[in-house]
Image (cartoon, grey):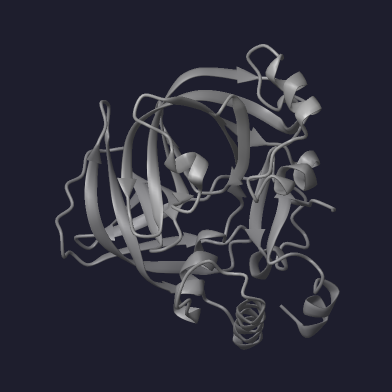
């Protein structure tokens, strides 16, 4: 990355919205007992930085083991590695998944890239844009490591007092028929959910990026429009998502700042087949993708 590239892309967002409908899924490997094992990785919490990991084959991991995770940037030129700490095993009906905390992250940045990443971090600190207390640059690098490949954005719709409340998230693991969703504890609509209650999670459409993020402060539609939406059979905000699930809450894993909501899918539907799903990619990684045609910047 050159200074010229930084100047050219200086106006794009820190977590840049992109359409990535044809990109190849990231490949991850965990090093355990001196063996590299392919796995699937899902970012699930920001504070601490927690990930869920699933394996194709059965594996037994013990606590206090030295565990490392690695992946590559989409251009294949950057190796990203992370040191992990095992939190717990989560058994499902058809497989086991593992919850890890990311302890350290190495991003393989050159001197200019490291300087620019530190500059982005300092700017966001001055703006007070982060909800994480005592937010350090080392913590920031762990989060940036999770955005090395496009991360899908979802819209959560929860009915409370006969009105649907909508908000976007990017912390979600879809594993088999289960969904693990990370949400801040300050979200009163999510916090009010009780076990066995049902709500919707949808794949957000990149064409509707601005409308989706107007819902980010948990705002509602105006009453007239909301009433019209309520009358629409089986749908919640059908024009701003690509696909939708109705899910049932089966468990909560409550931490100090965020909660993992464990849900089971009970109904699925697809509506806007012509729309592309919305992803986010950190600016430091997007700026290295000038020649990758399958990643499209979402203009807003």
Q: Is 213 situated left or right of 168 in this image?
A: right
Could you say where residue 34 lies in the image, as x and y percent from the top left? 22, 63
Could you say where residue 165 lies in the image, as x and y percent from the top left? 61, 35
The answer to which of 224 and 273 lies nearer the viewer is 224
The answer to which of 149 and 183 lies nearer the viewer is 183
Q: Is 235 situated left or right of 94 in this image?
A: right
From this viewpoint, which residue is outermost toward the top?
233
**Residue 199 visible to an observer of this rendering:** yes
Q: Assign the N terminus to one quadrant of the image.
A: bottom right
Residue visible at 36% across and 48% down in the picture: 52
Could you say where residue 179 lies in the image, as x and y percent from the top left? 43, 34
Residue visible at 71% across and 14% down in the picture: 231
Indicate the quadrant where residue 33 lies: bottom left
Residue visible at 35% across and 48% down in the picture: 53
Residue visible at 65% across and 82% down in the picture: 126
The answer to which of 278 and 68 lies nearer the viewer is 278
């Amino acid at each position: 990355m050159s200074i010229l590239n930084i100047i050219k892309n200086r106006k794009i967002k820190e977590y840049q919205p992109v359409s990535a409908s044809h990109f190849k899924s990231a490949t991850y490997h965990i090093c355990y007992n001196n063996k590299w094992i392919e796995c699937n990785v899902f970012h699930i919490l920001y504070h601490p930085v927690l990930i869920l990991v699933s394996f194709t084959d059965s594996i037994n991991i013990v606590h206090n083991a030295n565990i490392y995770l690695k992946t590559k940037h989409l251009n294949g030129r950057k190796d990203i590695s992370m040191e992990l700490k095992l939190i717990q095993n989560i058994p499902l009906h058809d497989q086991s998944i593992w919850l890890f905390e990311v302890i350290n992250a190495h991003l393989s940045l050159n001197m200019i890239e490291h300087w620019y990443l530190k500059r982005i971090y300092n700017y966001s600190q001055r703006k007070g844009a982060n909800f994480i207390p005592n937010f350090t640059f080392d913590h920031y690098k762990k989060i940036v490591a999770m955005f090395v490949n496009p991360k899908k954005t979802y819209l959560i719709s929860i009915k409370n007092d006969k009105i649907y409340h909508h908000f976007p998230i990017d912390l979600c693991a879809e594993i088999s028929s289960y969904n693990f969703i990370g949400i801040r504890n300050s979200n009163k609509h999510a916090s009010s959910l009780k076990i066995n209650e049902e709500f919707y999670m949808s794949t957000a459409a990149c064409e509707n990026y601005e409308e989706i993020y107007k819902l980010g402060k948990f705002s509602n539609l105006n009453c007239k429009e909301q009433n019209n939406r309520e009358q629409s059979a089986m749908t919640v905000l059908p024009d701003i998502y690509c696909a939708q699930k109705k899910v049932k809450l089966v468990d909560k894993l409550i931490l100090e700042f965020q909660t993992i909501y464990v849900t089971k899918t009970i109904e699925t539907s697809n509506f806007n087949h012509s729309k592309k799903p919305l992803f986010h990619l950190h600016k430091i990684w997007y700026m290295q993708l000038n020649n990758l045609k399958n990643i499209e910047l979402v203009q807003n």
